[in-house]
Amino acid sequence: MAVDLEKSSQSVSSDPAINKLVDAARTDDIPTVWDRYLTQQPQCKFGTTGVCCRLCHMGPCRITSKAPVGICGATADTIVARNLLREIAAGTAAHSDHGRMLVKTLKLVSEGKGGEYKLADIRRLHEAAAFFEIEMEGKSDLEIAGELADFFMEQFAYSNEPNPTLKLAPEKTQAMWKKLEIEPHGVDSAIVELMHRTHMGVDHDYKHLIMGGLKCSLADGWVGSMVATTVSDILFGTPKPIRSKVNLGVLAEDKVNIIVHGHEPTLSEMLAIASQDPEMLAYAKKKGSNGINIAGICCTANEVLMRHGLPIAGNFLQQELAILTGAVEMMIVDVQCVMPSLPEVTKCFHTRLVSTSEIAQTFNAEQITFDVEKGYEHAKHLIREALDNFANRDKARVRIPSESMDLVAGFSNETIFHMLGGRFRSTFRPLNDAIIDGRIRGVVGIVGCSNPKVRTDDAHVTLATELIKRNVIVLQTGCAAIACAKVGLLTPEAALEKAGDSLREVCEAVGIPPVLHMGSCVDNSRILMAATNVLNEGGLGQDLSDLPVAGAAPEWMSEKAVAIGHYFVASGMLVVLGHPLYVSGSENVEKLLTEEMEEITGGKFAWEPDPVKAADMICEHIEKKRDALGINQKRERKLLDMKERRELE
Ligand code: NFS
Ligand code: SF4
């Protein structure tokens, strides 16, 4: 819902911690994202409808009723589709480059050049190697890791064959992609192809363009992100349920506070370990700090939460606010979702801003480029510097909000299998049975960012609450998960109270919460696999598009979210966005994405700003799928035997 920011900062968010600090910032005359959002009003209609083209220097061109085509003759359909494709390409590039950095680290580890990095999950390594048919006989784990790293690296370049990681998807879904000719043949080549097709004077048919966009998005979801998640699990461990805390209240008065912000888990992993190093703890004591508090922002937060239980300071829109608490000695950033405004905020405090990626530098921040081989030393160095900065904290200016909330995270597919299957066998069966007999109506992924266009966190929380109330189980990643965590939706106890009766019954029986935090944004690959696992378990159709599932991104803002939305749609799922893609300038493109696509991939987009209406829309979709599966007829609640299950299929 649109926000009236002028009225009062109290309206920017449903989170009091945010509102308090936005007030404080305004008192101190330090602009934040919400103030800059106001300065940008009104936002350009040509941009928001997608009809501004600056792809060549005859332009820029804008489509109006007086000028219905660009100088080259491009129509609104072509321009809108091309702009959308460039967003998909950028989103795919971001996730996949993140994946590539991890593959490089895996390769270094396999060669003994990985410093303190190790193979943390050998089982996951073997599973992946087996799936991708890497010969393991007589080879050491390091050799297997090296070959797997080479195999993953090959996924980026062009190959004559479609990416083998697509085989992780259900067979019928793969067949659909083949028929539509949208199987990617390499991540980088898919991105390059989009850049080529959208260059002036190349691909002009909006339908053909959009199908090309889907192909690239599949390279994001089923290749680059799949690789990123798998390698993270191998290097840092596959997440298991873990308790922690969330919101700015996790910052400590009596300890040095270090914020890790960005996306790649490599450095933050070492920081997490180094913060427990006796040498570091002794240094902390010497500096008068009661320990070393490392807290995360954005998806780095999700990564270190899932594996180390480190607390989360906040999601995307809380990055400036963390500094405004006056209690952060150092903020360490790498890539993606890092606002260029940060130095403007840190300069008002003692906070040191350190940028660590070789490809990302922030003007007016310190640059200390991270090196895998020296990762641990590097982490210790940063912690020492932060501790040295502890004495510079101005205690009079510290204003840590009291808000902090418990949460449980760490629900990888492996964990869900294990929890559902009980002690002796791993299976999704109990979940499928509950969906088939209607105790659970369906499964919905709520993902994505926060955005000052929306009352922060409100849409995430309302949608998740509405869905669990209606007996729909919710899977989460990214900043959406952090939003829900802040109100306690990720504590099994609190969430169970809000869940519908039959969902609660199932969750209590198998010991899972109704809202499952599955990780960072690249871990949306885990949501794809969860849907695939449900399908493969049987009884719920043949294709991902048969499942009573949907995706939602109520507060999204990034190009990565655009790519994610498309790979869910390309995989056959309904995706409900809280605000539309920039496509309304082309009726044809909008109709293709929101209506006709259902006939093509089985998935489609919808936009709905009101989270309650979004829940209605999603539930209606789920019931339609259930009807089509024939599982909505009144049936006695009984356990199905194998024969009946086969009949259902
Ligand atoms: Ni996803 Fe994660 Fe957050 Fe959005 Fe940014 S941190 S990768 S893009 S803002 S969820
Ligand atoms: Fe204008 Fe065509 Fe150039 Fe775009 S590609 S800026 S529509 S002339």
Image (spheres, rainbow, N blue to C red):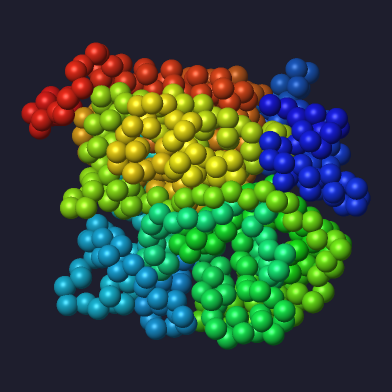
Q: Is residue 246 left or right of residue 5?
A: left
Image quarter where the C terminus lies is top left
The residue located at (25%, 20%) in the rendering is 631
Residue 559, image quadrant = top right
x and y percentages locating residue 547 in the rendered image: 33, 29
x and y percentages locating residue 425 in the rendered image: 18, 50
The residue located at (62%, 85%) in the rendering is 282
Can you say whether 398 is above or below 120 in the image?
A: above
x and y percentages locating residue 167 in the rendered image: 28, 48
Q: Is residue 272 visible?
A: yes
Residue 340, image quadrant = bottom right
The residue located at (41%, 29%) in the rendering is 472
Front-most of 474 and 126?
A: 474
x and y percentages locating residue 355 in the rendered image: 69, 68
Q: Is residue 543 left or right of residue 14?
A: left
Q: Residue furthest top?
A: 634
Please tell me how many numbered marks the rendered image carries.
0
Can you say whether 533 is above or below 342 in the image?
A: above
The residue located at (40%, 50%) in the rendering is 411
Q: Is residue 545 visible?
A: no
Image quarter where the N terminus lies is top right
Can you say whether 369 is above or below 470 in the image?
A: below
Q: Residue furthest left?
A: 643
